[in-house]
């Protein structure tokens, strides 16, 4: 199972000091956080994509490419790549380059975005968000899988004889997660293609996440990709820790109360009771996170949000130390315990490449007559039996 962090890259005043970092300081802090995430043993660093203040990550692949040069092991991903407002050709190009730069240590999470004004900035209509998503993702898949693409759709100009350059690393497209907070059509899209489904999970109660994940698993089986337990699921989460739980609550409260997203709404206690947010000791974080499996089943990726709402860099780095030292080892051990053998590991470039080579060998053995044609990036490629974490 993969564990990591994701950032929204907000530039928010620290409510305890009044200090607001510059955009340059926030970007440099994000780089430090990513390096620290690898240092403490996390598996994934992911960044969001935003094109409006007070956020900085408007060019995720630029950021991730720079981080790739400063890291060696950690997987670099997105917590949203806007499939609705980005052109599929540009997405395909950017992430193919990132694959090559990172040596395959990259994947991506597609999302629609929920900021209305962004759509017209890129010449789109938010009322067409779901049709845009479906059409653009269909084209994106073809660009990564076909040498020459002829295509025509409703929301962009046609393509004639287009060849992506560079081609995906080793001929294997990046693994795709589809992220959603509340939209069943996105779970359906992920299931249709056999891709991963990432339930944002940080604002809604467990019952909502359970419904979304269950829908995805059922439809994954319906489309012939495997049993529901073989579907590839990721979850978000939010944590703030101190070794003493009361210290954590006292320190985090002003950040929660003034956060742009949920500040001036429910109390900290109400929000932690109703959602996955955990504010307390490392042991409390472990206990609540392990409880996700009770309603989501055995899953493949857990990402935590830890650097928002104006928290200073020093505090975020301390959170990462606690994650690496006191939370991560326990989560790895407990999530591995009694995990059924048929539940796949999270797909990586290496596992997808091995599955692709195996598929090619099978096709060669029967002359291509009886082997079903499958997408190289399909989640079935991640059905390798669970591997021991390095």
Image (tube, grey):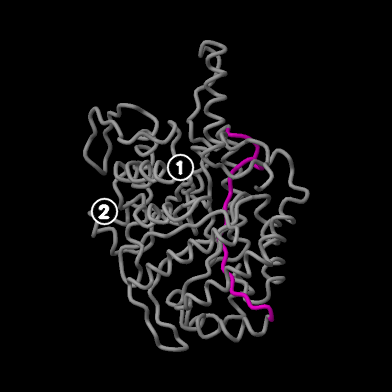
Quarter of the image holding residue 346? top right
Which residue position holds label 2? 124
| Helix, strand or loop for disc 2 | loop
Going 22% across and 54% down the picture, which residue do you hit? 123
Q: In the image, residue 156 lies at what x, y percent?
A: 24, 42
Specify which label sits upstream in the sequence, 2 or 1.
Answer: 1
Q: Is residue 147 left or right of residue 185?
A: left
Going 35% across and 64% down the picture, which residue do you hit? 115
Q: In the image, residue 377 lies at what x, y percent?
A: 48, 35
Q: In the image, residue 193 lies at what x, y percent?
A: 49, 37
The local crowd at label 2, few if under 14, some if 14 to 19, many if 20 or more residues have their Cα within 10 Å, is: some
Q: Give the residues drawn in magenta, as a range.
A: 225-244
- As measured in the structure, the alpha-carbon distance from the residue carrying label 2 to the one carrying label 1 is 34 Å
Q: Is residue 2 left or right of residue 283?
A: left
Quarter of the image holding residue 322? bottom right
- 240 drawn magenta: yes
Going 43% across and 52% down the picture, which residue do you hit? 68
The local crowd at label 1, few if under 14, some if 14 to 19, many if 20 or more residues have their Cα within 10 Å, is: some
Q: Is residue 79 above or below residue 247?
A: above
Q: In the image, residue 202 lies at what x, y percent?
A: 54, 65
Q: Nearer the viewer, residue 364 or 121?
A: 364
Q: Is residue 337 left or right of residue 207?
A: right
Quarter of the image holding residue 90? top left
| Helix, strand or loop for disc 1 | loop
Which residue position holds label 1? 103
Furthest-right residue in this view: 338
């Amino acid at each position: 199972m993969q564990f990591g962090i994701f950032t929204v890259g907000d530039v928010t005043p620290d409510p305890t000091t009044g200090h607001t970092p510059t955009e340059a300081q926030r970007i440099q802090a994000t780089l430090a956080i990513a390096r620290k995430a690898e240092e403490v043993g996390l598996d994934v660093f992911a960044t969001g994509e935003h094109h409006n203040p007070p956020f900085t990550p408007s060019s995720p692949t630029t950021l991730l490419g720079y981080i790739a040069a400063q890291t060696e092991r950690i997987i670099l991903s997105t917590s949203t790549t806007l499939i609705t407002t980005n052109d599929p050709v540009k997405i395909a190009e950017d992430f193919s380059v990132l694959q090559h730069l990172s040596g395959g240590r990259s994947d991506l999470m597609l999302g629609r975005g929920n900021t209305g004004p962004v759509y017209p900035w890129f010449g789109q209509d938010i009322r067409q968000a779901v049709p845009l998503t479906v059409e653009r993702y269909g084209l994106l898949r073809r660009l990564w899988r076909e040498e020459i693409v002829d295509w025509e759709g409703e929301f962009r100009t046609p393509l004639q004889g287009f060849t992506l350059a560079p081609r995906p690393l080793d001929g294997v497209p990046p693994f795709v997660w589809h992220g959603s907070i509340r939209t069943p059509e996105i779970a359906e899209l992920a299931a249709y293609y056999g891709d991963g489904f990432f339930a944002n999970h940080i604002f809604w109660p467990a019952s909502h996440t359970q419904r979304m994940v269950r829908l995805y698993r059922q439809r994954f089986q319906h489309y012939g990709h495997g049993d529901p337990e073989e579907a590839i699921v990721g979850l978000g989460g939010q944590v703030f820790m101190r070794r003493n739980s009361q210290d954590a609550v006292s320190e985090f409260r002003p950040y929660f109360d003034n956060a742009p997203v949920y500040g001036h709404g429910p109390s900290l206690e109400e929000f932690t009771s109703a959602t996955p947010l955990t504010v307390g000791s490392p042991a409390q974080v472990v206990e609540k996170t392990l409880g996700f499996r009770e309603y989501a089943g055995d899953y493949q990726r857990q990402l935590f949000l830890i650097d928002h709402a104006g928290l200073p860099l020093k505090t975020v780095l301390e959170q990462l130390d606690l994650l690496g030292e006191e939370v991560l080892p326990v989560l790895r051990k407990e999530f591995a315990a009694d995990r059924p053998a048929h539940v796949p590991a999270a797909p990586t470039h290496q596992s997808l490449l091995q599955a692709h080579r195996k598929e090619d060998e099978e096709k060669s053995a029967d002359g291509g007559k009886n082997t079903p044609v499958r997408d190289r990036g399909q989640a079935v490629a991640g059905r390798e039996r669970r591997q021991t974490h390095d």
